[in-house]
Amino acid sequence: MQRAVVVGANGVIGGNLVAHLQQSGDWDIVGLSRRGGIDSERVQHIAVDLLDGEETRRWLSHLTDITHIFYAAYQERPTWAELVPPNLEMLVNVVTVIEDSSPNLEHVSLMQGYKVYGAHLGPFTTPARESDPPHMPPEFNVDQQHFLETRQVGKRWTWSAIRPSVVCGVALGNPMNLATVIAVYATMCKKLGVPMRFPGKPGAFGSLLEMTDASLLAEATVWAATTPDCANQAFNITNGDLFRWNDMWPRIANLFEVDTATPLPMSLADVMADKEPLWNSIVAEHDLKPTPYRDVSSWSFGDFVFSWDYDVISDGSKARRMGFHHFVDTEAMFAGIVADLRRQRIIP
């Protein structure tokens, strides 16, 4: 039996990692987050502020038998430069404490993204490859990987860096979950009787994109962390297909039985700022789970993704060459997430 620490256990990535590890039956799991959680079979939750080094040591130093760290925590900040210190510090605090307390640590898995390639800055070389040269800092993903590379020298444990595209799954209160952005937007369009217009930049409607299903990502993350040949390497992990919003958007709208119309560039953060009463009325009308409006969607993240008027794709062949062959149909993924949101009574 192996024992894993999942850092960021309440997020869309960490939550699916916990579920995947639990279902495999081969793991005991410790989930770390600011909010904590409810313990269950083979899963222990710890609420801890990882930016507080003393608190991190107080809560984690008793973990003496950890074999794997799966790091998927993230703290939002207003600028790229301001993202670096807290997100690096949390990783450093966790690895330092657990490395000291667990002599049998085998692997540290770091969740990254396409910011490593400069995707957040503008058009970048596509399809992006793990061997692509770095870009001008600041970039916290790069600093985190550099820390692991440096720290690992001479140690028995190894690391891996996992680079998904936009991750989609079911998780609330998550700052980067496009699926709930779209689902809540579509629900409100239907309630108001207006077409579900694509709100992004004109060029974004026709650019090439790819997504990463959260469950697929969990499988790939554990695969890389437990396959010796993957040690000390980075891997792009995506569903395996490409799409354009001009084709996918009406397909998603059909899931909600809502019409589409000509795209209209607009900031969701602005136009959704006054929609809390509307959301509360939808929750009451359909007897939904009482989810606070602030937790149900991240409109600024939607604006970010819908602003990509350039291709955002990577080369995922490295993982396939090394043995990971799973894939997900992206249209089916969106349909499955909408069905899950309905089953959980988050949307009608």
Image (spheres, grey):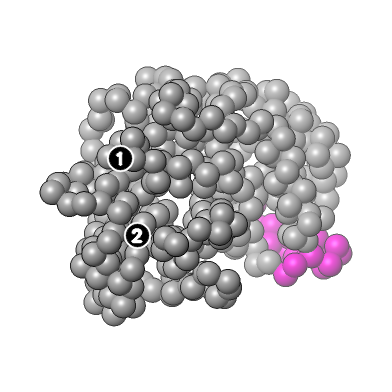
Instruction: Tell me where residue 309 appears, x and y as whole percent.
Output: 51, 25
Question: In the figure, residue 100 lies in which quadrant?
Answer: bottom left
Asked if the stretch drawn in magenta spans residue 284, the answer is yes
Name the spot of residue 89 as percent of width and height, x first.
25, 60
Name, please, the residue furthest toward the front.
Answer: 1
Nearest the viewer among 44 and 254 is 44
Left or right of 283 on screen, residue 311: left
The segment highlighted magenta reads: 267-290
Q: Residue furthest left?
A: 154
Q: Secondary structure at mark 2?
A: loop
Check disc 2 and give the amino acid type: Thr
* Image position, residue 229 (x, y; %): 33, 35
Mark 1: secondary structure: loop
Query: Which residue position is annotated with label 2?
Result: 67
Vertically, is 110 above or below 293?
above
Query: What kind of residue is marked 1?
Result: Ala
Q: Is any atom of residue 234 visible in this view?
A: no
Tell me the residue at 59%/25% (across/down). Answer: 241
Query: Label 1: which residue?
Result: 231
